[in-house]
Image (tube, rainbow, N blue to C red):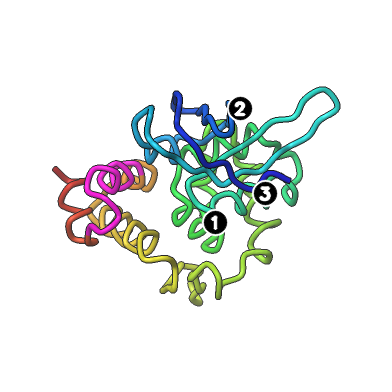
């Protein structure tokens, strides 16, 4: 099992990257949320990967973090009717923190906005994954009203989630807020505070 690939980034598009290591070039399918965080071609890069084997193909899928890779695996292996292509589409639309929060909160409307995900598939995501997401690991604890609260998420994900919540409170649609905060995070770096992310996203 290939669980990660480290080497020189040869090229990248929003949905694929080529990393060369040990004389071999690996084509790896990635979500937009990972593409946003890749360095420039020619620079060192590492992707956490999952190999998916079919009768006529073997495909590598890569992610910026182990948590995103594991969530991708969960989507593919545990949700009826969701294959790698659809799972990649889901992870391209929303950050991991927003996806997990939407599932725990039962936010079918937000999930249904992901390309290729209709209301029925969104309902399956909530029904089949809610019990499989460990609140202690994810940092999302459902309150009595079904809203995600609180957290021991990695610092970066915590700040992204909090900034997204702040923008939605200001009237932004959740998907738009998530995209704006992700872009702000890429521009400012992992050390940026929640306040800086919000200011950048608004600007």
Give whichever of 96, 64 is nearer the camera: 64
Name the residue rendered at 44%, 73% in the picture: 152
The location of residue 191, given as percent across then percent down, is 26, 59
> Principal SS element in the magenta part?
helix
Q: Name the residue that disc number 2 marks.
A: 24
The location of residue 87, given as percent across then percent down, is 61, 40
| Mark 1 Cα-neighbour bin, 10 Å: few <14, some 14–19, many ≥20 | some
The location of residue 130, given as percent across then percent down, is 63, 62
Q: Is residue 88 left or right of residue 9?
A: right
Q: Name the residue that disc number 3 marks.
A: 73
First in residue order: circle 2 vs circle 1? 2
For the residue labelled by badge 2, is the local secondary structure a helix, a strand or a loop? strand
For the residue labelled by badge 3, is the local secondary structure a helix, a strand or a loop? helix
| Mark 2 Cα-neighbour bin, 10 Å: few <14, some 14–19, many ≥20 | few
Q: Are marks 1 and 3 in contact (CB under 8 Å)?
A: no
Residue 35 seen in render: yes
């Amino acid at each position: 099992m290939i669980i990660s690939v480290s080497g020189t980034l040869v090229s990248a598009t929003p949905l694929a990257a080529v990393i060369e290591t040990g004389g071999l070039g690996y084509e790896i399918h990635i979500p937009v949320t990972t593409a946003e965080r890749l360095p420039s071609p020619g620079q060192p890069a590492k992707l956490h990967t999952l190999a998916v084997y079919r009768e006529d193909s073997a495909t590598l899928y890569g992610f910026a973090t182990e948590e995103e890779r594991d969530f991708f695996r969960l989507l593919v292996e545990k949700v009826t009717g969701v294959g790698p292509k659809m799972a990649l589409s889901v992870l391209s639309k929303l950050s991991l923190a927003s996806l997990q929060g939407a599932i725990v909160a039962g936010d079918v409307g937000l999930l249904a906005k992901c390309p290729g995900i209709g209301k029925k598939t969104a309902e399956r995501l909530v029904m089949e994954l809610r019990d499989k997401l460990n609140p202690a690991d994810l940092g999302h604890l459902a309150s009595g009203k079904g809203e995600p609260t609180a957290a021991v998420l990695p610092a970066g994900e915590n700040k992204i989630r909090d900034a997204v919540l702040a923008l939605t409170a200001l009237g932004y649609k959740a998907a738009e807020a998530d995209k704006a905060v992700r872009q702000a995070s890429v521009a400012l770096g992992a050390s940026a505070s929640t306040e800086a992310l919000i200011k950048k996203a608004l600007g």
